[in-house]
Amino acid sequence: MTDATAGIAADLVLASTAAAVAYAIVRTPPLRRLAGLGVRLWLGGSVSAFLLGAVRDAWAESARRV
């Protein structure tokens, strides 16, 4: 098996696993609620931290131009 073939096989396995997990989450209400909570925590934490860092960098960059 070549590296390219192995990569394609690994991608197919990952894609089918992701599809199976997504199906299980959509069809099971407790898992759906848990996934929603995870998304809210991710959006509330990492996205706001990224925006805070971007604003801080922009603020520092604007101070250098003066």
Image (cartoon, grey):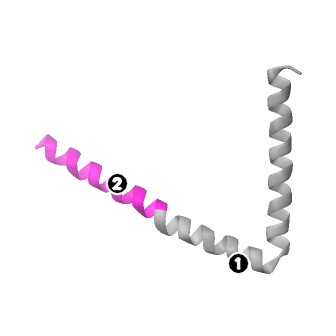
Residue 29, x across and y down, in percent:
79, 80
* Quadrant occupied by the N terminus: top right
Residue 25, x across and y down, in percent:
79, 69
* Quadrant occupied by the C terminus: top left
Disc with the residue nearer the chain's start (1 vs 2): 1
- The residue where tag 2 is placed is 53
Residue type, mark 2 in image? Gly
Report the Cα–Cα distance between label 1 and label 2: 30 Å
Say which element carries label 1.
helix
- Magenta segment's dominant SS is helix
Q: Is residue 55 left or right of residue 26?
A: left
Query: How dense is the environment of label 2, judged by Cα within 10 Å: few (below 14), some, or many (20 and up)?
Result: few
| Residue occupying the far front of the picture | 1
Q: Is residue 30 left or right of residue 27?
A: left
Residue 14, by quadrant, is: top right
Residue 64, x across and y down, in percent:
15, 42
Residue 22, by quadrant, is: bottom right
Who's the residue at 85% across and 64% down the image?
23
Q: Which portion, as a residue range, is magenta?
A: 46-66
- The residue where tag 1 is placed is 33
Say which element carries label 2.
helix
Q: Is residue 50 above or below residue 4?
A: below
Who's the residue at 74% across and 74% down the image?
32
Q: Is residue 65 left or right of residue 23?
A: left
